[in-house]
Amino acid sequence: MNEDLERQALRVVSPELLPLIKMGLINFSFPEKGPAPAWTGWDEKARVFKISILRELAEQASPSLLGMLIEHEANHIACQHFKIECMLPDRLIAGDVEANGWMRRRGTYDPLQKGLSRVLGDGKLVDPVEVLTELGLDTERVYRADIIHDMIHDGELEELIKQLMTGSNMCGGIEHVDDDRAAAIGGVVAAAMPDAEARASGRMWGTEPGEGRFSYAMRPTPPWAEKLMEFARAVIETTLSDGRKHARPIPSLRQLGVHVPSIKPRWGHKPKKACLMVDVSGSMWWGNILGYLASAVKYLRTHNVNVHFIACDTRIVMDEELTDGLPQELPGGGGTDIVPLFDRARELKVEAAICVTDCELPHWPDKPPFETLWIVPAGQHVPFGEVAFYSEEE
C-alpha cells in the first residue's frame, strides 16, 4: 500500500522537487497515526528529510491536494524551520505563517485550505494574513519564521495561539536539527523551488514587496568541470602507513593462552604538490570557471596535496601557496605568455598541474615532467596532456 501511495506522490509532486526526491534528499511515509495530518521529520540514521502524510488522508486526497500537501511540507525544509530551537505552539505557528505565506504568494494556499477542510471536515490551516494582522505587520509580505516566532513569543499572544491550535492543524513541525547535511538539503530544496530568488532576498526584514516573477532551473555540472574533478581525484594517492596496535588479541592464538594484539592497518594520503596556473591576459573569459576551480582545490587540499597558485599575463603576477580558497582578485590584463607558468611549476617540482588559458598564445611551452590538465575553450588544440573544453554558454 505504501508503495502505491509513494508512486502517487511522485506523480503529483512539482517538477522542481522531483529530482531532489530521486536523489534521495527527501522521502515519503504514510503512517496510520501521527501528530498532524502531515508533518516532516529528520531521519537521523538515513540523514534525509521524511515527509509524512496520514495514510487515510493520502488515500482520500485528490492529486492536486496531495501535491499541495507536499509543497507545504517542502516549504518547511526550504525555509530551514528545523533551526528554530523552541518547539512550543508559537514556533509551529511561526513556521506555518512563512510556509503558507509562500503558498499564498503562489496561489495555492486557498485551494489547500479548502481541500483539507473537504477531506478532514475540521481541517484548519494557520492563516498568515490573520497572524500578520494581529501582529500589526504588512500582510502582503512573507516574513521569516524566526522573526514571527520572536514576535509571538515576546508578545505572549495566548488567545491567538489557542485559536490557531484548535482543530486539526496542518503542521506537525520539524524538531530542531543541528546537522550540516540537513542545512545543505534545506538550501538545495530552497534553490530548486519556485520563488528561489525571492527566498534569498525578499524574506529579509524591511524589504519592499516585489513585482516580478522568479523561476529557477537546476543546471547540470558542465562536462569540463567533471573532467577537472576526475583529474583531481587521479592526483590523490592512498598509501599504507604505520599500523597501530589495539587490545583485541588474534583469535587463532587466544585458545593457546597467547595474547598477541592485532595490527590494524592505517591508510593515509601521500603528500603531494600540485599547482593551478591561470592565464590572466586581457583576452581571458572567466564566467563560472573559478567557482569550479575552487572546489577542485579544496578537494586536493583535504587529501594532503599542497596547491600552489600561479597567475601570469606576459609575466608572473601572482605566486603563492593556497591555504584558504582562491585569491579574491587577480591582477593582470596584459598580453599573453604562459611559458613562465610552466617554468615556475618546474622549479616547484610539482607532480600535477592545471592550466587555464584561452590558447591565444605566441608559442607553447615545452612538455613538462608532470601531469597536466588544460582547461581551454571548445575547438582549441593543446600540444600535450589532458584537456577539458569549456564554452561561454555553459
Image (spheres, grey):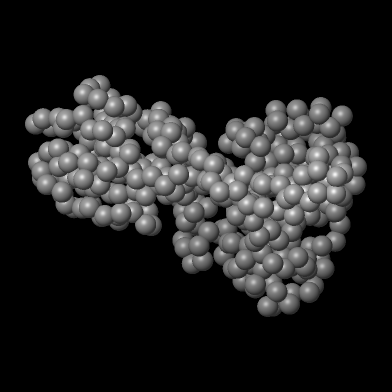
Q: Position of residue 342 (x, y in %)?
A: 20, 39
Look at 58% across and 36% down and name the residue there: 16
- The C terminus sits in image quarter: top left
Q: Is residue 247 visible?
A: yes
Look at 30% across and 42% down and name the residue there: 350
Side of 139 relative to 388 (left or right): right
Side of 207 relative to 259 (left or right): left
Q: Position of residue 250 (x, y in %)?
A: 77, 44
Query: In the image, is residue 333 above or below residue 207?
Result: above
Q: Position of residue 195 (x, y in %)?
A: 53, 46
- The N terminus sits in image quarter: top right
Q: Is residue 188 visible?
A: no
Query: In the image, is residue 122 above or below residue 220?
Result: below
Q: Nearer the viewer, residue 107 or 281?
A: 281
Q: Position of residue 269 (x, y in %)?
A: 49, 45
Side of 238 relative to 55 (left or right): left
Side of 338 relative to 222 (left or right): left
The image quadrant of residue 111 is: top right
Look at 31% across and 32% down and name the residue there: 371
Q: Nearer the viewer, residue 108 or 267?
A: 267
